[in-house]
Image: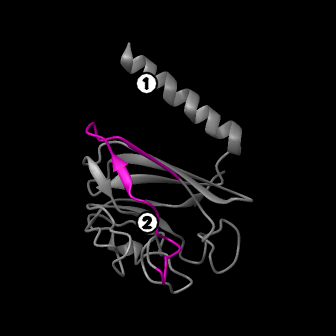
Amino acid sequence: MRAAWLLLSGVILGGCATLLHGSPQATADLKNARGEAVGTASLWEDANGVRIITQVRGIPPGKHGFHLHAAGKCDPPEFTTAGAHFNPGRKRHGLKSPQGPHAGDLPNLEVAADGSGRLQYVTKLVTLGSGPASLFDADGTALVVHANPDDDVTDPTGNSGGRIACGTLRKAS
C-alpha cells in the first residue's frame, strides 16, 4: 500500500511541476560510473530565474555536493571531462563565499537512507537562453553529484570530493 501511495504521489507531484512550469526547457539524465541511471533533472526559466528540479535514486545516503560543470561531457568513471564548475563570472566557490559564488554552485543534495533524494532550487546566475551565463554555450553544461557534502566556501570545489554521478544538459524537445 505504501509503495502504491509513493508512486501515486510521485505522479501527482510530477504532474504539478508540469502544470506550474509547462514542459521542461532542459533535462539531464544522471548516470553513475557504471553507466546506470540514477536520476533526472528538469530545468525551466522564468522571471524568477532558472528552476532546477532533480530527483535521484541509488545514491549513497547523506549530503552530496551538486554543481553545474563547465562542459557538457560525462565520461565515466571519474567524469572529469565535465571540467570545473560553471563560472563565467570568475567568482570564488561557495554559496556562503563573500567573493562568490560560482554560477554553477548549487545547494547540497540530501539523500535519504533508501538512496533517494530530491532538490529544487532557483538560481539567477545562469540562463537557458543566450549570453555569457548560458548553460547552452559552445561546449554545453553537465550536472555533477559529488561524493561528499560541499562546505559552501572552500575554493574551488567546496571539498566535495570525487564525482559519483553526471548528466549532460540538453534542450528539451
Q: Which residue is under mark 2?
A: 67
Instruction: Please tell me whether residue 140 belongs to the stretch shown in magenta.
Output: no
Picture coordinates of residue 31 (x, y %)? 36, 53
Q: Residue furthest right?
A: 47
Residue sitting at 49 percent across and 79 percent down? 100
Q: Which image quadrant for residue 76?
A: bottom left
Relative vertical location of residue 118 with respect to residue 16 in this rendering, above or below: below
The Cα atoms of the two marked residues, 1 and 2, are separated by: 28 Å
Picture coordinates of residue 5 (x, y %)? 45, 19
Q: Say which of 29 and 126 sits in front.
A: 126
Disc 2 crowd rating (10 Å Cα; few below 14, some 14-19, many 20+) is many
Residue sitting at 65 percent across and 68 percent down? 127
Query: Going from the N terminus, do you reach mark 1 or mark 2 first?
Result: 1
Q: Residue furthest top?
A: 1
SS at mark 2 in the image? strand
Number of marks drawn: 2
- Report the span colored magenta: 98-120
Relative vertical location of residue 124 with respect to residue 52 in this rendering, above or below: below
What amino acid is at disc 2? Answer: His
Instruction: Please tell me whether residue 109 belongs to the stretch shown in magenta.
Output: yes
Q: Say which of 142 and 14 sits in front.
A: 14
What amino acid is at disc 1? Answer: Leu
CB contact under 8 Å: marks 1 and 2: no
Picture coordinates of residue 117 (x, y %)? 38, 44
Q: Which image quadrant for residue 114?
A: top left
Q: Which residue is under mark 1?
A: 6
SS at mark 1 in the image? helix
Q: Tell whether 161 sits left or right of 13.
A: left
Q: Say which of 20 and 42 sits in front.
A: 20
